[in-house]
Amino acid sequence: MLDIHLPLMLFVLVLFLTLIVLLNNMLYKPLVKFMDDRDTSIAKDLEASKSFSSNTDELNAKADENISIAKNEAAGIRQKAIDDAKTLAASKVETKQGEVEKEYEGFVQKLISEKENLKNELLSQMPLFKESLKAKFSKL
């Protein structure tokens, strides 16, 4: 039937144990070391990314602060420009109103003088009108 050979079994057992030791030293230990190193590297990278993310939060806060300051400065500059433009426009309007008032005064004075001239002219020609009226009434 089955023959069991003890020396062959011992040889296979020794060969199997030798193979386990060799595979352990050549394959399993380097593979486990590689996986441990990889886990360590991943853990380091995660810590670094967390520090970077906290750093980016800080940088974002600084950027928001700078943007806020810039917006306030822009609003101040815009308001100053608007105020300057209003002041300039008000001075121009005031100057123009002064000119218009002077022209109006000149026009009124000219109108008064023309009125006096017309009145004097009409008064000087009044006897001629009276004569022409008398002549017309006499014809009637």
Image (cartoon, rainbow, N blue to C red):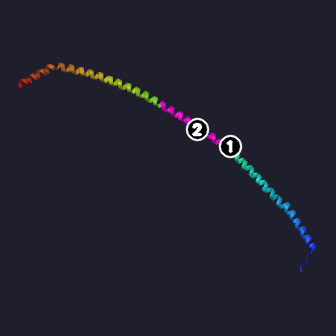
How far from the left and from the top, in percent, is residue 38? 76, 54
Q: Is mark 2 on a helix, strand or loop?
A: helix
At x 22% / y 22%, what residue is drawn? 118
Q: How crowded is mark 1: few (under 14 residues within 10 Å), some or many (20 or more)?
A: few
How far from the left and from the top, in percent, is residue 18? 89, 65
How far from the left and from the top, in percent, is residue 139? 6, 25
Q: Is residue 121 magenta?
A: no
The answer to which quarter of the image holds residue 133 is top left
Region rendered in magenta: 58-84
Q: Does the magenta stretch include residue 70?
A: yes
Residue that carries the numbered disc 1 in the rendered image: 55
Q: What is the quadrant of the C terminus in the image?
A: top left
Q: In this view, does 136 lie to the left or right of 44?
A: left
- Residue 106 image label: none
Q: Which amino acid does label 1 sit on?
A: Asn
How far from the left and from the top, in percent, is residue 74? 54, 36
In the image, 133 versus 10, the foreground residue is 10
67 is higher (above) or lower (below) than 132: below
At x 88% / y 65%, what residue is drawn? 17
Q: What is the quadrant of the N terminus in the image?
A: bottom right
Q: Residues within 10 Å of mark 2 (few under 14, many from 20)?
A: few
Q: Which amino acid does label 2 sit on?
A: Ser
Q: Is the magenta stretch mostly helix, strand or loop?
A: helix
